[in-house]
Image (spheres, rainbow, N blue to C red):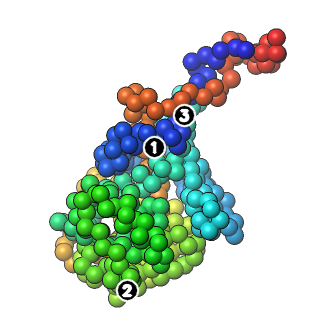
Amino acid sequence: MTTPSKLALVPFVSVDNMMKLVNTIGPAKMIAEIADYIEADFKRWEQFDKTPRVAAHSEEGVIELMPTSDGESYGFKYVNGHPANMARGFQTVTAFGVLARVDNGYPVLLSEMTILTALRTAATSALVAKYLAPKGSKTMAMIGNGAQCEFQALAFQTVVGIDTVRLFDVDPDATAKAAKNLAATGMTVVSCTSPEEAVAGAQIITTCTADKQCATILTDNMVGAGVHINAIGGDCPGKTELHRDILLRSDIFVEYPPQTRIEGEIQQLDDDHHVTELWRVMLGKSEGRRDDKQITLFDSVGFATEDFSALRYIRDQLATYDTFIELDMLADPDDPRDLFGMVARAAL
């Protein structure tokens, strides 16, 4: 049996490796550091190849590829979204990702991204709120207490400075789970029995539900002047969470309009409805929050550059933390023209 060369080996971060890395660095610190990488990449937005994600839709859910490149590195994420999975004992969302060199096409990292996507989604939400939420925001309503809930709460505590989270889910067991997991964070955790109760007194409202349908999680009368809405559940065609009238009262901020108009809350609006791209706000080219009465809405669908940022972050951590294994993924014959000979010699 031949020993693979170093060129053939690709670092692989498994689920177990990722959990070790999160617990070594600390989830709050890791979210904050990923947010810094995401912000840095938003600020060089024009360097990236950008395309709406490639989606294969079915009655059961969706499977998507999310690619991008900055000219030096190429990254993609494979991700699914199947709302009925939980009832069948599966995760609603799973993912893995690859980072590769552009100059020779060789992958330099393969990683689980189910956990990493939760971290980067929370990091993105909190990063955007840093620019758009009312100054001094201390209370967030979290409507939808599934797998993303605790990551979001921790991100907003760490990056934005909230100290109270008000929870609601149509499944009381989900709220109880989230309240238990957040008990040691130092935040005040309030379990609510209705979305109306959850949003009372909140400066930030996060919606994160999984049903693949046009739903009304927030009605117009639930949203008062001056709040910031972090809408992360509407992320595919035919799936929304907010009443259309809320959108008409809000200043809407998006990652990449060609994708968000297909998948986000703004699929309810005309294609020429004005939205502001986040990279422009981060570079000071467009206004974010102007005053205390403005309703800001982050119509979040998740974009490939955020996954690219998260993969860059993980790659950089592997220089410090031994939380990976090396996979023999790439054929590397002594003579690049003699792939057949390499195979034949392996039988000897």
What label does residue 220 carry, if any?
2
Mark linked to residue 12:
3
Q: Distance between the residues labelled 2 and 1?
A: 40 Å
Amino acid type, label 2: Asp
Q: Pointer 2: residues within 10 angstroms few (<14), some, or many (20+)? A: some
- Residue 311, label in figure: none
Residue 212 visible within the image:
yes
Q: Where does label 1 land, which residue?
A: 19
Residue furthest to the bottom in view is: 221
Q: Quadrant of the N terminus?
A: top right
Name the residue type under label 3: Phe
Neighbour class for label 3 at 10 Å: few (<14), some, many (≥20)?
many
* Disc 1 crowd, CA 10 A, few/some/many (<14, 14-19, 20+): some
Secondary structure found at label 1: helix
Please state which amino acid type lies under the numbered disc 1: Met
Q: Residue at x 52, y 47 (%)?
A: 113
Secondary structure under tag 3 reads strand
The percent position of residue 233, horizontal first and vertical second, equals 47, 68
Q: Tell me how far mark 2 sits from mark 3, CA to CA.
A: 46 Å
- What separation in Å lies between label 1 and label 3 (alpha carbons)? 13 Å
Q: In this view, does 36 lie above or below 152?
A: above
